[in-house]
Image (cartoon, grey):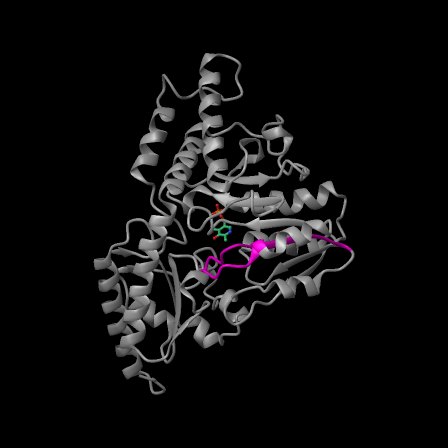
Amino acid sequence: MIYLDYAATTPLDPQVRAAMLPWLETDAGFGNPASDHALGRRARKAVEAARAQVAALLGASAEEIIWTSGATESNNLAIKGALEFRGRANAHVISSRIEHKSVLDTLRYLETQGLRVTYLTPAASGVIEPEQVRAALRPDTALVSLMWVNNETGAINPVLELASELRARGVLVHIDAVQAAGKIAVDLAQLPADLLSVSAHKLYGPKGIGALFVRKRPRARLSPQIHGGGHEQGMRSGTLATHQIVGFGAACALAAAQLGEEGDRIRALRERLQRQLQSALPEVLLNAPAAADARAPGILNLSFTGVEGESLRAMLPELMVSSGSACSSATREPSYVLRALGRSDELAGASLRLSLGRYTTAGQVDAAATQIIAAVQFLRELSPQGSG
Ligand code: PLP
């Protein structure tokens, strides 16, 4: 079995697991971090140390990190919370057609409450150009919500170029950085976003824990979406999951320590995979910008003309890959992201998202390439309109 689905989720790093285990032990780690006794204080100290680790990876300060159950919740809290606080239910928001469902469905829900949304269509490369955002701005635009790295194509959006000018116009900036954090440099000292979502399970941490960065100066204000004991500066109530949080912190510390080196290694493997496939097979289209550094290191999205997507994936039982994102593949529709890039239903369906990560080896890449090449050649020979 070859796992090439790191964009869907990553395995827990053994060092992260080791950091988490003490907090699952009965005698030492079960205190409620909100309790005012020795066990509670011990847990609180661990939670705060992890907060500093997450903040360090993002170039933020610890008090700007709010724990959530994952980036789906972070995105909901950012968008609903910011608009509700500003009392702007019928304001205008700019986003894009290639956002994750946790952004798109949140916006669609808010549209039923009166929100107006402009969904930008990316260029064929999958990138949202700053000029498109500028052109969509209106006097009542309250928020721009864009992803930094697309989870299906790996395309990097030029968010750095935009954030400062948007903020100068009083427009809040929310960035979904789930596929960027721990993969490319994220520095909130350089990127003046107000809100930024991250998730632990995309960077070798546990599932079920995420964070929302909420800028302190100038203060981004949010109405809570989960009410209760007033945890997390009143923005997100609920007893904190110490072991999950400690794991997230450890994962961020590891990611920060090896970011550049790991990125280079994974990018080289991705290039090797792309080269092997495109040199052996004609008509393999890259669904992303051509430049290697315009994409996140680990994601390779290709469409294979002349094959039927379901048959292709059925012929690759050894490969853990996806077409589109794991979250939307249940619908069995061709990827809405690839369709937004202008790919036909056929080409969007005949795509593979191959995502590489920390444990991917050159041997795995070569074996995956061999299997994909054989499957595509076989299907193209069978198909009357086969093109290879
Ligand atoms: N945003 C992007 C870009 C993602 O890839 C994902 C992952 O599925 C999410 C948001 C949702 O994250 P989570 O699984 O933590 O809810």
- Name, please, the residue furthest toward the top: 37
Quarter occupied by residue 96: bottom right
Horizontal arrangement in the rendering, residue 370 relative to residue 158 (left or right): left
Rendered location of residue 121, percent (x, y): 59, 67
Rendered location of residue 16, percent (x, y): 35, 35
At 44% from the left and 41% from the top, the residue drawn is: 200
At 33% from the left and 80% from the top, the residue drawn is: 282
Residue placed most toward the observer, 65 or 99:
65
- Residue 141 lies in magenta, yes or no? yes
Quarter occupied by residue 252: top left
Residue placed most toward the observer, 63 or 370:
63
Residue placed most toward the observer, 125 or 85:
125
Horizontal arrangement in the rendering, residue 352 relative to residue 168 (left or right): left
Rendered location of residue 371, percent (x, y): 24, 68
- Name, please, the residue furthest toward the front: 190
Q: Quadrant of the C terminus?
A: bottom left
At 34% from the left and 28% from the top, the residue drawn is: 21
At 55% from the left and 70% from the top, the residue drawn is: 123
Q: Which residues are magenta?
A: 140-160
